[in-house]
Structure formats: structure tokens, C-alpha cells
Image (spheres, rainbow, N blue to C red):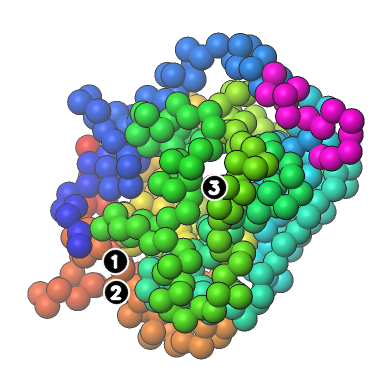
Amino acid sequence: MYQTVYIKYCKNCVMPDTKWENRLDETGICSACRYVEVKEKTDWEKRRAELKQIFEKYKSKDGSNYDCICPVSGGKDSHYITYVVTQVFGLNPLLVSFRPTYRELTDVGRKNLENLKKTFNVDCLEFSPKPDVYRKIQKIALLELGDASYPAHFCIFTIPVRAAVEKKIPLIIWGENSQAEYGGPIEDQNKKYLDPVWLKKYGLSIKDAGHSDYNGPEFLRKHGIKEKDLIPYIYPSEKELRDVGVTGIFLGQFVKWDIFKQVELMKKWGFSVIDGKSEGTYTNFENLDNKDQGLHDYFKWLKFGYGRTSDHVSMEIRKNKLVREKGMELVKKFEGKIPEQYLDEYLKDFEITRDDFIKCVDKFANKDLFKTDANGNLIRDENENIEKINSDNVD
């Protein structure tokens, strides 16, 4: 299942070649770092004019419907997207927010979502799935796929698009193209539109460390989820999309995306960060809304050898806000720790023990990347954490 036996890191940032679809070029530089060069050469005034034309094309001419849909969670990107759409271009959007369950949403997450609605004076449609079904799917996904966030990752794409079809609002404004900002194939970095090809590859599937696809509805049917409970997890048909003319664009391909500047700007519009640091990293401004983020990032680290700290460090290096050596120190300090903050809540909800959880860790950890004993068992410290084999190597 696993093929990686030695991690190679980007020579500019700290992203490893074990990241799915991350590619190091012949000079050892990753695709995300190369995209920074592309951004600097882009004519953003021309892109802005293009964006204005798109908005003019799709906005409701008589005001009888919303001009667009903005998928939101309440975080920094949600605030910035809504700010650009309402304050810069004067559109009337319908915000669509997928809220997994009341147990998933953090206090700061609820505060930020309420601020988003109030500050920008916008309508917001919030959707929550059946709690028992959602929790069942989470448990299945954790034990079978190593990702308790699996149902959420599906619904953040399906729910806004279902709303677009049902309410006949063709334009959907997404945030950044993740394959551009975080690293991916060059051909996918340049995409301005979230089309079915991009969606199938990066949105409505999940990759394990063996790069296998798991289509949501089919996978869930096989695990006994009833058809009537699958509605939120099913993407509209091609005919439904064509009838409405649903079109999704990446805002980050039309305005120069800079999360650090955007966070500071959105603070002035009421966006709240947390005191201290988010679990699994050293920052306080990202992934604040859902409690399962720590679990997700930890299993990403188990499968691919990097976590949220590596993402944040690499972004700071690319913005010349951090030197690589300091970044590696942060990675070693914050990554690879069992996410204890909400773990007991999840173990109780999933009706599994901590020993069951550790067995799940053993199942999904890429043992080619971690220290093992003579019998091939992962070596743990007093806190049950494991260690990468070549964690000191950054070349």
C-alpha cells in the first residue's frame, strides 16, 4: 500500500513529496512555491475586470433572486469572500453554510458565523444533516478510511450546489484553488472554474496513502447507510446542473490571494481568532470552527508525514515571513501529537475505547515513515505519540 521510504522536502519550503499530487521539479522546488512566481507575473487588474464581467453576467437583473451563492463556514476565507462580493462588487449573495452537528461547531466558530451574517447584512442558509447518521458516517470513515471529516468534506461541495440548483442561482463563489495555493499539478493550478473534472478529482473523493478513490454515496451504501439518509451527500445530476447553468469560480484566481493580509483586514470586520494556538499548529486564525480538524490533521500526518503546521510554515516561507530553519523547528514542535483536545468526546460518541483509537492509528500510519521495533510495531513515547524516521532530515 505504501511506497514512500524516504521523504524529500521542497528546498524552499517544508512540504514533503509525500503530499498527494505535490510535485518537486528538477531543482527540488514544489509546485506551490512555483505558483508564487506565477502569481507575481499575473495581471491582476485584468483578472479583476474579468471577474466584474462574470458578476455582471450572472447577477439577478431585476433583483428577484440572489446574485450568487457563497459557501461559508464563518472562517477567515468566508469573511473575505463575503467582503469582496458585497463591499467591493455590491452583490446580493446567499450564503450557504454546512454545519455538521451542534457538537462539531466550536464557540468561536458560531461567533464568527454570526458576525459574518450581521456585519455584512446578508442572508444565510444553514444546513445540518441528521446527527445520528452523520455520527455513524464519521465513525465508519475514521475506522475504514482514517478520516472522521469525510462526510463534511463531501457536504461542503454538495450542499451549496444543491442549493444553487433548488433556488436557481447559477453562480457559486468558492475561495482559493487549493491545488494552486497548497500545491498540485500545474494543469490544475491554472483553473479559474471549479468544473466537474476538478470536483471529481479533489472534491468528491478521498485519497488514502495508497492514492485510492472513495466515492461517497457508493462507499456509504456499502456500509448500510439508507438511501433516504444519503440525500445531503449526493451531488446534483449533470442535467440538473445544465438546466440551471451552475458555474463555480475560484475567487483566488481573480483577486490576488494572501491569507495573511486577508486575516488582518477581516479582523477589522469582526473576525475573531482564538487565544493561544489551534491544535496541531502554532497559528490562531485557521480551521477554528470544527472540532474534528485536529483528528483530520493528525491522520493526514500519519498517512503522508506532514500536518497543518507544515501547511502554515510553508505559506509563511513563501511570503518571506519565516525562514526555513525556523519553520522546521515549528514542524518538529507541533506536528505529530495525538489530538487530545476533543478526543474523549469523539471516543464517547463513536463508542470506541482509546485502545481502539490507537489500533486505528496503527492501521493508517505509514510504517515506512515512522520508527518501529524489531517486530514492526510502532514505537511510542509516554504519551503514545510516534516519531518519523527522518524527521531531522530537511534535504
**Quadrant in which residue 12 is drawn:** top left
Q: Which residue is under mark 3?
A: 238
User: Which comes sooner in the sequence, label 3 or label 2?
Assistant: 3
Front in this rendered view, residue 122 or 233: 233
Residue 275 visible in the snapshot: no
Q: Which mark is residue 365?
A: 1
Front in this rendered view, residue 320 or 120: 120
Q: Is residue 151 above or below residue 199?
A: below
CB within 8 Å, label 3 to label 1:
no
Determine crowd level at label 2: few under 14, some 14-19, many 20+ residues with C-alpha closer than 10 A. Answer: some
**Quadrant in which residue 251 is drawn:** top right
Left or right of 25 on screen, residue 102: right
Real-space CA distance between mark 2 and mark 1, rounded to the nearest whole angstrom: 5 Å
Q: Say what amino acid the circle numbered 1 marks.
A: Ala
Q: Which residue is under mark 2?
A: 362
Give residue 59's position: percent from left, percent from top.
78, 30
Residue 3 visible in the snapshot: yes
Determine crowd level at label 3: few under 14, some 14-19, many 20+ residues with C-alpha closer than 10 A. Answer: few
Please report the bounds of the magenta region as a residue range.
53-66
Give residue 247's position: percent from left, percent from top.
61, 36
SS assignment at label 2: helix
Left or right of 382 on screen, residue 141: right
Q: Say what amino acid the circle numbered 2 marks.
A: Asp
SS assignment at label 3: helix
**Disc 3 or disc 1, which is closer to the eye?**
3
The residue positioned 32% from the left and 39% from the top of the image is 22
The residue positioned 67% from the left and 42% from the top of the image is 244
Determine crowd level at label 1: few under 14, some 14-19, many 20+ residues with C-alpha closer than 10 A. Answer: many
Q: Say what amino acid the circle numbered 3 marks.
A: Glu
